[in-house]
Image: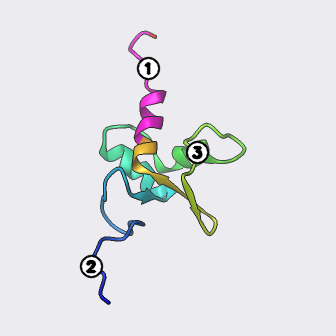
Amino acid sequence: MNDTSPPRYPYQGDLGDQAYYTTEQAAQFLRDRGFPISTRYFGVLTAPSVGSGPKPDRRFGRRNLYLGSTLIAWAQGRCQKDGA
């Protein structure tokens, strides 16, 4: 049996908002969509002691995994109107 469908866990590239992303990939996913966030700052926000980042959708071993749609919703929720 040869399954040629793309993996749900992306090792390279962008598989869209229904794929799972690691913390490092999540920061890049957001930057690719125009949200100015560094990998380091995203890691700080998602640390349990800070807890300001998006909640992980899954875990794979010790790694948090985030759906692209969750990341976009979280980033849009952090945006403020100019002068707010």
Q: Which mark's residue is nearer the viewer, 1 or 3?
A: 3
Where residue 25 appears, x then y in whole percent? Answer: 43, 57
Amino acid residing under circle 2 = Thr
Span colored in magenta:
72-83
- Left or right of 12? Residue 27 is right
Residue ID at (56%, 49%):
43
Which of these two is toward me, 3 or 47? 3
Residue 10, by quadrant, is bottom left
Amino acid residing under circle 3 = Lys
Where residue 60 appears, x then y in whole percent? Answer: 57, 67
Mark sitting earlier along the chain (2/3)? 2
Extreme residue toward the bottom, this view: 1
For label 3, count other residues whose C-alpha is less than 10 Å away and answer few (under 14), some (14-19) or many (20+). Answer: some
- Left or right of 12? Residue 9 is right
Residue ID at (31%, 53%):
16
Mark sitting earlier along the chain (1/3)? 3
Q: Which residue is mark 1?
A: 80
Residue 55 disc label:
3
- Left or right of 54? Residue 29 is left
Which of these two is toward me, 16 or 13? 16
Amino acid residing under circle 1 = Gln
Residue ID at (48%, 50%):
39
Residue 4 disc label:
2
Question: How far apart in space, not on screen, are marks 2 and 3 (Cα)?
Answer: 31 Å
SS state under label 2: loop
Mark sitting earlier along the chain (2/1)? 2
Q: Is residue 45 magenta?
A: no
Residue ID at (36%, 44%):
31
SS state under label 3: loop
Which of these two is toward me, 84 or 15? 15
Q: How is the image coloured?
A: rainbow
- Left or right of 27? Residue 47 is right
